[in-house]
Amino acid sequence: MAKRKLEQFAQFTALENTFEFAKENKGQWNKIFGNDNPIVLELACGYGHYASTLAERTPHINYIGIDRKANRMWHGAMHCAENNITNARFLRISIDDVNLYFDTDEVSEIWITFPDPQPKDRTAKNRLIHPKFLERYLALLKPNGIINLKTDSTLLYNFTKRVIDECKLPLFEDNADIYNWADRPDFLDIKTFYEKIWLKEGKTIKYIKFGLKKGAFDWIEDMKKYC
């Protein structure tokens, strides 16, 4: 297993659609894609299935999958390379440092698919929907930029709704069971590796689409303690 991971890591770094800790790309992503199309991020993308499938379905949009584990993103990067999907890239960084890699107003939309819900109160600050992260995303997103969350976690779903309510953020979609949603958008049918596991376990899949706005987090005196 360790040998396989090392092989995937080496292959990942050799692909033309992958980057590692490439701070020089900040503000240059549209040039890298060779067009002015919108840029969409998938944070904690894991195997990169969502980013690669969205890229395949919507070639007029640029997608960047972000994760710390190259051997996982290798799957999505290889799929795109083998199928000539040229509007997807994969970036190996920590999401804590995302502002070092993207410039102000460089991103149009963010996807967060099945992130670790960080169920303990003491680790709530690590939830990717925590206000400390949302404030970072705000700096990257264009005006009227969108955040999409897809999760099996009731805890994270309720936490997100609380953040949206207390920060008075615009809420565009809220569905606690997308597979019982008659008018479900096609892009929600994409199933990640982890989603397939949760569905087999009988869990319901939740979806929230919301926006950010300047000053929304100013009232939180100590974000690190917000949970």
Image: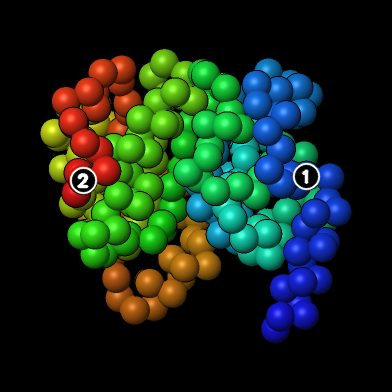
Residue to which mark 2 is pinned: 225
Name which residue lies at 16% across and 25% down. 219
Q: Which mark is residue 17?
A: 1
Q: Position of residue 132 (x, y in %)?
A: 33, 37
Q: Amino acid at mark 1?
A: Asn
Closest to the observer, 218 or 177: 218
In-image side of 96 versus 64 (left or right): left
Pointers 1 and 2 in contact (C-beta within 8 Å): no
Q: Position of residue 164 (x, y in %)?
A: 21, 35
Element type at mark 1: loop
The crowding category of the residue bearing disc 2, from other C-alpha atoms within 10 Å (few below 14, some 14 to 19, many at least 20), is few
Q: Residue furthest bottom?
A: 1
Residue 217: which quarter of the image? top left
The crowding category of the residue bearing disc 1, from other C-alpha atoms within 10 Å (few below 14, some 14 to 19, many at least 20), is many
Closest to the observer, 38 or 106: 106
Name which residue lies at 41% across and 16% down. 143
Element type at mark 2: helix
| Visible residue check, residue 208 | no
> Relative to 26, does residue 1 appear above or below in the rendering?
below
In-image side of 23 versus 176 (left or right): right
In-image side of 134 versus 17 (left or right): left
Q: Which mark is residue 119?
A: none
| Visible residue check, residue 45 | yes
Q: Amino acid at mark 2?
A: Lys
Closest to the observer, 119 or 109: 119
Name which residue lies at 62% across and 38% down. 63
